Image (cartoon, rainbow, N blue to C red):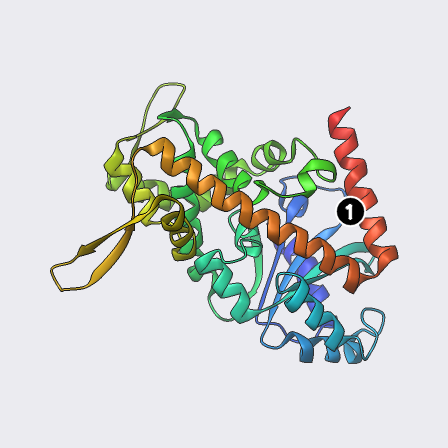
Amino acid sequence: METSQRDELASFLTVLPPVDFCCVYGSTLHPNNQDKSKMVDYILGVSDPMQWHSQVNHYASWMVHLGGARLITQVADKVGVGVHFNPFVSWNDRKLKYGVVRMNDLVQDILDWNRFYLSGRLQKPVHLLVDNLDIQDVNSVNKRAAVSAALLLLPSKFTEEDLYAKICSLSYMGDLRMLFAEDTNKVNKIVKGQFDLFQSMYKPFLEECETKNLLRFSSAETNLVQDSSLSSSRSLVSSLPASVRSQMRKLLGEKKTLSETGRVSREVCIGSREEAAKCMEKVMKRRVMVSSARQAVSGFLAAGAINATVYLSQKMRKAWNSRS
C-alpha cells in the first residue's frame, strides 16, 4: 500500500478516541483500486468499548448519540459476538464502516476460534494501521491453524489458489448470509484480487509445512502435493485451536496419552482422514452459523432498523447480481 493511501486511511483515526488496534480490509486492498465509492472497512480494537463509545461524542458527534454507548456494548456482548459495526459513516468524501471490539475478545477469538468471526477476517489480507499490542504476531497462531484446517479439507494435489480459496472459505461455511445476502463468487474474487497478498501472508507457514513433510511444492500444474496419511491428518488436527478439538473429541471420541514428562494429553480419535475432515467441517459450519446469526440480530438492534435494512438490501443486491 502506498504511503499516500495509508495516510488517507489512517487520517480517519484522528477524529476518533485512541485505539489499540486498527486494520482496514476488503476491496481497499485490491491492487490498482481507484473506486472511492466503495465502502472502506475498519476493525478497531479498544480496551473498553463502552468507555470508547461514550467518548466518541467528544471527537465526532455525528457517529454515536451520547447515552447509546451502554446499549451498543451490551447488545454486542450479549446478543452478538462482541463486535459492533457502524456502517454508512460519511467522512472526507468516503463511505466507511467500522467495527469496535474489546481487545481481550479479539485475542481470544484469534487464538481459540471461540466465535470464529474476526479470526476468520484476519485469515485474509488486512492492512494494519495501529498495532500497539502486537496482534500481528498473535495472529500467526490463527494463520497456522487456518492452513491446517484448509489442508485437511483439500485433496492430495491442489494449487496455491485452491489453498487460499479454501482458507478464505472457512469463515463462510455455514454463514447464513451466503444463502441470500452475499456474492456467490465472493471467495474467488477475494483470492484473485489479492493473490499476491495471500502469497506473502502464508509463505512462512507453507515453508513450515514443507519442513515437517506435510506438503511439498511440485513443478507440475498442480503445484502443491500433501501427505494424506493418517499420521499427517492427526498432525493437522493437533494444530487446530483447542475449542475446535474439544468439539471434535465429543463427536469422534478421545484417547489419552502420557508424555515422557508425565503430562496427560487428550487427543481426537481419528479413524480416517475423511472422517476427521467431515467432523471439523461440521464443527466449523455450526460455529459460523451461530456467530453469523447472532451478529445479524445484534446489528439490527444496535444500528437501527433503517441502517440495517439499507445495508442488508445492498448485500442482497450484490448477491442477486452474482446469481444472474
Query: Quadrant location of the C terminus?
Result: top right
Expressed as whole percent of the image width and height from the top left, the position of residue 220 reads 36, 19
Classify residue 247 as left or right of residue 190. Answer: left
| Amino acid type assigned to the residue bearing label 1 in the image | Lys
The structure residue drawn at horizontal position 42% and vertical position 60%, both measured from the top left corner, is 137
Quarter of the view holding residue 279: top left
Expressed as whole percent of the image width and height from the top left, the position of residue 176 reads 67, 43
Q: Work out whether residue 298 can be spotted.
A: yes
Expressed as whole percent of the image width and height from the top left, the position of residue 105 reads 54, 67
**What secondary structure is marked by label 1?**
loop
Residue farthest top in this picture: 220
Residue farthest right in this picture: 306
Is residue 130 shown above or below 235? below
Classify residue 196 as left or right of residue 233. Answer: right
The count of marks equals 1
Front residue of this view, candidates 21 and 54: 54
Q: Residues within 10 Å of mark 1 (few under 14, many from 20)?
A: few
The structure residue drawn at horizontal position 34% and vertical position 49%, both measured from the top left corner, is 239
Is residue 245 shown above or below 222? below
Front residue of this view, candidates 200 and 8: 200
Expressed as whole percent of the image width and height from the top left, the position of residue 148 reads 38, 43
Q: Work out whether residue 2 can be spotted.
A: no
The structure residue drawn at horizontal position 62% and vertical position 61%, both measured from the top left corner, is 81
Front residue of this view, candidates 37 and 74: 74
Quarter of the view holding residue 190: top right
Residue farthest left in this picture: 260
Quarter of the view holding residue 30: top right
Residue under label 1, please give it: 36
The structure residue drawn at horizontal position 67% and vertical position 51%, both measured from the top left corner, is 293
